[in-house]
Amino acid sequence: MDRGCSPCPPSTYSSTENASDCAYSGCGISELIIAAGSSTAPAECAPNPDFIPLDLDDSSLIGLAASGARLYAATVSFSEVTFHGFEGGAPLDALTISIEGHPIAGTFAIAPDETFYSSSRDPNVPGRIWLDVVTRDAASAARVAITTTSADVWLGLTSTPSHWVYWDTEHNGLGHEGVVRSASHSEPAEVETLIRQTNLVHVSAENMDRLFLTVSEPPRLYRLLDLTPPLEQVALPASFVPTLSAATATGKAYAIGLSSDQRSLEAYQIESNGTVTEHFEHRVDESYPYLMTGAIDPDRALYVLFYSREKISPGSYRTRNTYYLLRFDLTSKDSTLLHLGSGENSWMEALEVKSDGSVYVAGVHDGTLFVRKVY
């Protein structure tokens, strides 16, 4: 996505010399064969079929999640959340619900039966979080109240085969601590506090037997087994700084982070018994990488979404973010870096892998929300 280009010209615009004006996030130059034996095929600027714009006024993205062959993006506008579904490249009927409060980015998850979860802050009661639970056909909907001391900074929502898991950082009067809460899909209102941990920055869930918690000071990765403390530290090299983790129900998880010199993006494979077996590494030539999220195509690939930040010009306070998707082949350990684009008013923070192995990112470009297939 070359975000420095002008908007896409009309579909009748045809000139290979103007490829740079066409190649932005939603368009690309495509060759057209006009006659058999033609030595040169003309080109026209046409919509990229793998780019799905969500042209919604005053909307923002909450998150992206997959359920089998279906992909869902959750957006919010004022007091409504809309769940947009896609299957086989075709849109499904969108589902819109009314909410109370201020939606929280990054807190969208789907249960195996395609029940949707999203959360928002109560505008009137400090520390109260509302978890909205609604089935795909809207036949059932509920609101679950989560009482916190002051949810802020780091937070997230994920779904396992049997439970939803919500985590955040809260102020306990002395400092900040991370709190992980959960409930089963069958009884979503029966909320249980699983653990409290200082300096919590990320949580991923393989299944409800294993949660992975990343803490920042000192940088460590822990497992929570059988929902029962204490935490079990994963033995990672001292030269590795874990930032986040990714886990699936196949029994394996991955610690993702940077080398101590911040010049290599690394990942370590963690077996179901907690042992570390495989190491993946990609040397980063860009400026300091900010890791966003990771996703797994089980037994095939690990994906890491990150960006680097640079000033528009020397001495300028304005910055441009450049986004990348790193792919580790889990068999050969080869790494492939895909440049996704850059822009001053653009960002990407959602990454998802469908059951067929296709990979999607979501974000915003010049005010337009989008979902884009990248693999």
Image (cartoon, helix red, strand yellow):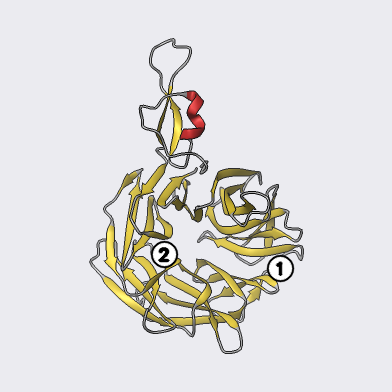
Q: Relative to the observer, which residue lies in front, 85 or 27? A: 27
**Residue 240, image quadrant:** bottom right
Question: SS of the residue at dot 1?
Answer: loop
* Residue sticking out furthest to the bottom: 173
Q: Mark 1 points at which residue?
A: 235
The one nearer the camera, 89 or 272, is 89
| Pointer 1 local density, CA inside 10 Å: few below 14, some 14–19, many at least 20 | few
Residue at the spot x=53%, y=76% of the render? 226
Task: Inspect the image, locate mark 1, and give the three-letter code of the amino acid beneath it.
Answer: Ala
Asked if residue 258 lies left or right of residue 101, the reply is: right
Image coords of residue 92 (percent x, y): 29, 50
**Nearer-N-terminus badge (1/2):** 2
Describe residue 91's horizontal placement relative to residue 67 as left or right: left
Place of residue 328 in the rendered image (x, y in percent of width and height, measured from the top left):
62, 48
Task: Tell me the crowding category of disc 2: few under 14, some 14 to 19, or many 20 or more residues within 10 angstroms, Cα based.
Answer: many
Camera-near label (1 vs 2) is 2
Residue at 48%, 12% (x, y): give it: 39
Which residue type does callout 2 highlight?
Phe
Give percent across and percent down for residue 359.
48, 47
Question: Residue at (41%, 37%) from the top-left corner?
Answer: 8
Residue closer to the observer: 17 or 152: 17
Q: Name the residue under label 2.
A: 108
* Mark 1 and mark 2: Cα distance apart in space: 31 Å
Name the element at disc 2: strand
Task: Indicate the position of residue 147 as horizontal and vertical percent values.
Answer: 43, 84
Picture quadrant where residue 272 is located: bottom right
